Amino acid sequence: MRLMQCYRKAASVLALTWSVVLAAPAQAETINFSAMLTNGTCALSLDRSILPLGTVSPLQFTPGRLLAPKPFTLFIRNCTGSGLFTPQVSVFGNGVTQDNKWLFRNAGSAAGIGIMVIQSDTVPDYSQSEIKDGTIIQVANTGQIPADQELTFYAGASCGGTTGCAEIGSGEVTATLMFDFAYQ
C-alpha cells in the first residue's frame, strides 16, 4: 500500500511537472522581408524646361494652322531591365479636343487657343497626327532594353478648326507636359 502511495505521489508530481511545461509561454521571433521588384527604367531628360513660342496676334490664328512651331528633344538614356514587357514613354498633360485636334492647355489660358505637339524630325504640318494626353510611344521592341535615343517634337499654338478659331480670346496660353517611362 505504501508503494502504491509513493507511485501516486510520483505520478502526481510528474503530471504537475508536465502541465507546467505545456503551460509555459511560447517564444516567437518575427522577421520581415521586403524587396523592390522593378522592370527597370530609363533616365528621361529634355533639352529645355521652358519653350517660349513668342507673341502672336489673335488675327494670325486661322482654322487648320499651327503657328510658330518650335522643336524640343526628349533624351532617353541609361535604360535597364527587360523581360516580357514593352518599353514605352507615355505623355500626359491637361488640354481639350478642339475640332478633332488635341490642344494642351493649362487652366486659365486664353480662350480658344492651345499648344499642339507633334512628334517629328522636321517642321510639321497641322494635318499630322498630334500627341494627346495619354499618348504612348514605344521606344523598343517587347523584351528589349531601349538604346539611348532622342525623340524630337514640335510645339506650336493653334485654335484647331473653325469652331475653336471662332472663340479666340487674348491673354497668355500655357501648357505643361509630363513624359513618363514604363515597361508595360
Image (cartoon, helix red, strand yellow):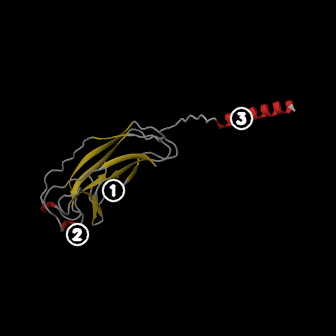
For marks 3 and 1, the one nearer the N-term is: 3
Give the tally of numbered discs: 3
Q: Which amino acid does label 2 sit on?
A: Thr
Q: Mark 3 points at which residue?
A: 16
Label annotation for residue 133: 1
Q: Count residues near mark 3 (Cα–Cα under 10 Å), then give few for <14, some for 14-19, many for 20+.
A: few
- Residue drawn at (19%, 66%) of the image: 165
Viewer-proximal residue among 7 and 107: 7
Do the CB atoms of the residues marked 2 and 1 lie less than 8 Å apart?
A: no
Residue 122 in view, yes or no: no
- Residue drawn at (36%, 54%) of the image: 135
The answer to whether residue 75 is above or below residue 184 is: above
For marks 2 and 1, the one nearer the N-term is: 1
Nearer to us: label 2 or label 3:
3
Q: Mark 2 points at which residue?
A: 163
Residue 144 in view, yes or no: yes
Q: Position of residue 125 (x, y in %)?
A: 27, 57
- Residue drawn at (29%, 49%) of the image: 153
Q: Count residues near mark 1 (Cα–Cα under 10 Å), then give few for <14, some for 14-19, many for 20+.
A: some
Q: Is mark 2 on a helix, strand or loop?
A: helix
Viewer-proximal residue among 47 and 35: 35
Q: Which amino acid does label 3 sit on?
A: Leu
